[in-house]
Image (cartoon, rainbow, N blue to C red):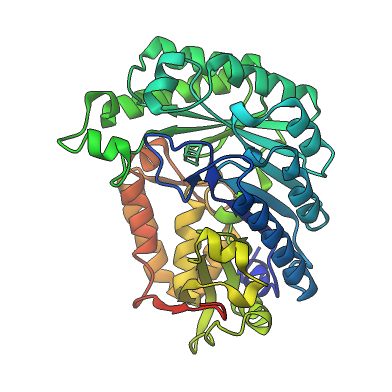
Amino acid sequence: MGASDWEGHLHAAGALALYAHVPFCRSKCAYCDFSSLSTRADDPLVTAYAASLARMIGQAADAGLLEGCRTGYLGGGTPTLMGPAVGALLSRMAPHCPRELSCEANPDSLDAPTLAAIASSGATRVSVGVQSTSDEELAALGRIHTSAQATDALARAVAAGLDVSCDLMCAIPRQGEGSWRRSLDDVLSAGVCHVSVYPLQIEEGTAFGRRYADGDPAFNSEDVQAARMREAERALTEAGLLRYEVASYARPGRSCAHNRAYWTGLPYLGLGTGAAGMLTAEGYARLRAVAPQLPPAPEGAARARLTVTSGRREVAAAAGLCDLDFDLEFLTAPQAAAEDLMLGMRLTEGVGEALLAHARSVLGEGAVDDALEEAAAESLVRATPAGGAAPTERGWLLGNELFGLMWGLAPGTVASASARGRGA
Ligand code: SF4
């Protein structure tokens, strides 16, 4: 495979993946810095917001932006807060997501009618925020569901015929080796085919950020994080799930195609408050045709990164894409190649020969090979038999170093801009 094999999707005229964000939850978890607001399920703002998202998806489709789209993800927040009405929004996405459509769910709101609405909407997959199966740990995290609710929700989703994934969190208050192992065993017993595991990140501006402002607590130390991640790898691979990304494990053939799009340089459209998107220069030009508030891409831009900065009320009140506010970043072809190398290092398979050939052609052979040699000398990457490069376990443990080396290949500074919608 040569550089041109990789270059093909760098010029896709639209999005190959679709993300829609529902920024509402029943209550705020103590560690959460995601875009979400706690509210009631029957808040009219939630209904108006969902209707607006559906309108914008239709508008993007009419503009030809979703012609090659294969996968979708309805995330949050808590999409299942909407109850069975979430099915209507998923049905709007489904025709554009023939390969895979996921819905994020919380155990407390994945009741029988909501699950039935998801299963009949065209969605193929649910991703359930379990985090732990210890009631003590769940309470410490500020989660509003119990362990029994979580394992019951997983088992019912499996029985409904959906691919079921769950998130688990390690290095959290009150967690010990034994309870971590039990959480892993409990979700495996419920029949999930995909598990994502994350160490708790204590972020500023959250309840945990304030509580632990005086220093890193022992339960969250780097050593504890590394030990828990190692235990997860042991337990999950022993149960037949393969680690395909630094935080993701799946039964063979059940990795998340949508998340893979983020790590393999495929363009995606993100809609809703706080949603991120990435488009080629061609895709960006197509979006501008229906969102004229977007500035022209600067000379030499190969990729646009977009974040919707409109609040929930603005999105709910928007007539269409032309009313949205965005923050923008424009990457040149060399910067985009460095970004693809960085993101590819999240995957077990690493970066393939075609991406390396493309990166060498735009970043210079010497620069790419020097960075890879430096990473290999530090045991952060290894060469693959197929002519690519893949991260080592140490490369993942020292992720910032490895990802920094790859992104460090990007020349110049990334151009940025913002755009205010018609309604602003
Ligand atoms: S359910 Fe998820 S998005 Fe909502 S507050 Fe908790 S962690 Fe944040």
Q: Is residue 75 left or right of residue 124?
A: left
Residue 276 visible at all:
no
Q: Report which quarter residue 9 is drawn in.
A: bottom right
Place of residue 424 in the rendered image (x, y in percent of width and height, measured from the top left): 50, 77
Place of residue 299 in the rendered image (x, y in percent of width and height, measured from the top left): 49, 90
**Residue toward you, 230 or 287:** 287
Place of residue 333 in the rendered image (x, y in percent of width and height, measured from the top left): 50, 76
Q: Report which quarter residue 196 is drawn in.
A: top right
**Residue toward you, 367 or 113:** 113
**Residue toward you, 71 or 351:** 71
**Residue toward you, 177 or 378:** 177
Name above or below for residue 53 compared with residue 379: below
Place of residue 366 in the rendered image (x, y in percent of width and height, measured from the top left): 38, 70
The residue at 70%/75% (across/down) is 13
Name above or below for residue 149 compared with residue 382: above
What quarter of the picture does the N terminus occupy? bottom right
